[in-house]
Image (cartoon, rainbow, N blue to C red):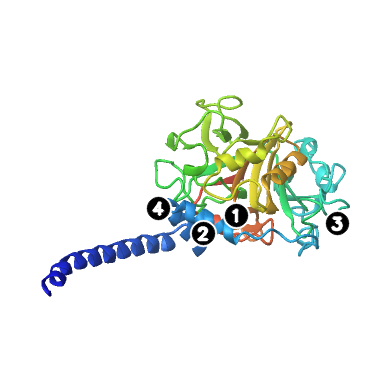
Amino acid sequence: MSAAPRRSWPVRRILLALLATLVLVTGWSLGHALTAPGGGTVSERAAEWARDHYLGPLVTLGEWVSYEPPKVGGKPSFALTGPSVPAGRRDASLVGPSSPAARTDPAGLASSLIPHRLASPAGKPLHGEGAWRVLGSVHGVPAIFGTYLRPDKVHTSYVAGIVSMNPRLLRFRLRPGAQDPGPGQWRAQPTIPLGHRRGLLATFNGGFKIASSGGGFYLNGATRGTLKKGAASLVYYRDGQVTVGVWGRDVRKTPQVAGVRQNLRLIVDHGAVPASVDSDVQANWGATLGGGYYVWRSGVGVTRDGRVIFVYGPALDVRTLAELLRRAGCVRAMQLDINPDWMSFMYYLPRHHRADPTPVNLLPDQVQSAERYYAISNRDFTAVFAR
């Protein structure tokens, strides 16, 4: 009667040992993910770890269960005129074609590219809404403009940030992330360290995890994933120019291409929002919330006259994001990353030292710190420098 239980003890010990090993390995792996350099909140790091360990459907289920639609109505929590600055500063002044900022450009480099004031999708504009401020200048010529818009007539307490950048005055550089794309022969750092900040004017986030982006990542001869024909592509050239297009149709690999960041399909094409924009995102973005959910989103595009537009903000479904990019003049645009933990646009002011400018968040309610890219970043991003 007692022999059978005694024979079961070795099996039980083996199972317990295996379970203990699994717990230890899992704990070490998760602990490493939570403490590795690269920034990010505990929740975002845990979610990334889970996705990398075949638990993506569980994370997605958690997102769906915890999703709360944005509130209806109300007013923004901050002024849409932007932060106040000392008198005489041009880096945050309201501008237009006849403004003082426009008159400081004798060569005409910026005047032809000063964007027109944007009408508010929410109806009657609030004070400052849709009016452009100069966020960065090159040799006294305005090069980066920013404004705020409420995204629609329903979610009127939320605000999207919109940026217009003049590539004739700027250089755009792709930077890798320490975890995505991860280590490689990128010949670029996952940060902007001291000593490499002179001329830095702006930074903004990249796309979703490359494994789920529907495309690949290329930088300085090295590749992660596969550059796919038909994918929306943010393409960086060796001369500092950048554009957005369909890989294999508008853009392709040439010796002049320094970097490529692919992410799903275009959400603005030929100046229009495709009828299939919602299904395109929902079908291709299988690892996270689909296009129909109102969450933090970001996107980038180009206008007919060459300006680069960046849009991000809360309470955006993919169609609303696309409409904001189109409203800002984009003829081609793509979605970048989503969810609050990844959103960021910072402009940089030479308040104390031009070699170490001070970062400022465009949206005061973004989760990420303004100094996000002054430390190692775990995800890829774009750095914008003066020419």
Is the residue marked by circle 2 packed among few (<14), some (14-19), or many (20+) residues within 10 Å?
some
Residue placed under numbered mark 4 in the picture? 53
Identified by mark 1, the residue type is: Asn
The reply to whether residue 75 is visible in this rendering is yes
Q: Compare marks 1 and 2 and give the one earlier in the sequence.
A: 2
Number of callouts in the render? 4
Estimate the x, y position of residue 43 in percent, counting from the top left: 51, 62
State the residue at coordinates (67%, 45%): 318
Q: CA distance from mark 3 to mark 4?
A: 47 Å
Q: CA distance from mark 3 to mark 2?
A: 34 Å
Identified by mark 2, the residue type is: Glu
Residue mark closest to the camera, 3 vs 4 = 4
State the residue at coordinates (52%, 41%): 213
Residue 24 vs 228, above or below: the answer is below
Estimate the x, y position of residue 242 in percent, counting from the top left: 61, 35
In the structure shown, which secondary structural element does the residue marked by tag 3 occupy? loop
Q: Nearer the viewer, residue 184 or 112?
A: 184
Residue placed under numbered mark 3 in the picture? 126
Is the residue marked by circle 1 packed among few (<14), some (14-19), or many (20+) residues within 10 Å?
some
Q: Compare marks 3 and 1 and give the one earlier in the sequence.
A: 3
Q: Nearer the viewer, residue 108 or 118?
A: 118
Q: Compare marks 2 and 4 and give the one earlier in the sequence.
A: 2
In the structure shown, which secondary structural element does the residue marked by tag 4 occupy? loop
Please state if 169 lies on the left or on the right of 46 as rendered. right
Residue mark closest to the camera, 2 vs 4 = 4
For residue 139, which quarter of the picture?
top right
Residue placed under numbered mark 2 in the picture? 44
* Mark 3 touches mark 2? (CB < 8 Å): no
In the structure shown, which secondary structural element does the residue marked by tag 2 occupy? helix
Residue placed under numbered mark 1 in the picture? 339
For residue 98, which quarter of the picture?
top right
